[in-house]
Image: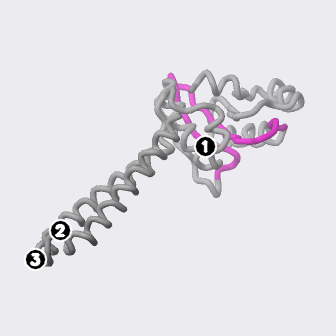
Amino acid sequence: MRRKRITLQLIFWFFIILLSTLGMVTIPFFYGWNILVPSICVWLLVLLFCCYKIHSLLRSRTAYHRGDWSLRELDDLPGTDFETLTCDILASNGFDIAESTQASVDFGVDVLARKDGVSYAIQCKRYTSPVGIDAVQQIYAGRAYYECHVAVVLTNQYFTSNARKLADKLGVVLWDRDRLEEML
């Protein structure tokens, strides 16, 4: 719902730019050429303001506000945006710290978080099918590398039965689609 509202606002500001440009072109024909310089100045100010509004809307497009995102919208996000949004979701759920790791050398950990003195190594999986045992193995190793207390795999889907069995054996916490919906 929020993304649709932002898209409509973007269309509005582009429409304002179009109207102001059309007005700029037609002013000399109706009011004479001596008003051209002041109208250019006003047009530039309108253009700058519209560009500022468009820029801020594009930046807020992936910002998290509790209750504004649905699971369906999360399903459409690219993986890196899903990781960034996960940090915001964790922060809104009482985590003191939630930050993304370096993408190229993350050792299977996408987000490092802390809550009540407990450190979490979290792997984010935005999939279209159930998550398998590879994710559990990766986060188990990543938790040890980052020396965290808890290893978590967070996904917008569900886990295979083998992934659940391995997670139980290794002590890895699995946050599936239902848990993610609770956090939203």
Give the CA distance from mark 2 to mark 1.
44 Å
Name the kind of residue labelled 1 in the image.
Phe
Q: Which residue position holds label 1?
A: 82
Precedes in sequence: disc 3 or disc 1: 3
Which residue is pictured at 72% across the width and 39% down the height?
139
The Cα atoms of the two marked residues, 2 and 3, are separated by 10 Å
Q: Nearer the viewer, residue 56 or 106?
A: 56
The residue nearer to you, when weighing 82 against 21, is 21
- Disc 2 crowd rating (10 Å Cα; few below 14, some 14-19, many 20+) is some
Figure check: 168 above or below 81: above
Q: Is 111 within the magenta? A: yes
Disc 3 versus disc 1: nearer the observer: 3
Q: Which residues are magenta?
A: 106-132
In terms of secondary structure, where does tag 1 sit?
helix
Give whichever of discs 2 and 1 has the lower sequence position.
2
Q: For mark 1, does the 10 Å Cα neighbourhood hold few (<14), some (14 to 19), or many (20 or more) residues?
A: many
Residue 137, compared with residue 171, is above or below; it is below
Residue located farthest toward the front when viewing the structure as drawn: 30
For label 2, the residue is: 39
Local SS, label 3: helix
Tag 2 secondary structure: helix
Image quadrant holding the C terminus, namely: top right
Instruction: Using residue 40 as the reference point, say whether residue 96 is left or right of it.
Output: right
- In this orientation, which residue lies closer to the viewer: 56 or 167? 56
Which residue lies at the image location 14% right of the left edge and 78% below the top edge?
Answer: 33
Residue 182: % across, % down: 61, 21
Pair 2/3: label in front: 3
Separation of marks 3 and 1 at Cα, in angstroms: 53 Å
Give the number of the disc on residue 34: 3
Q: Quadrant of residue 133?
A: top right
| Circles 2 and 3 in contact, beta carbons < 8 Å | no
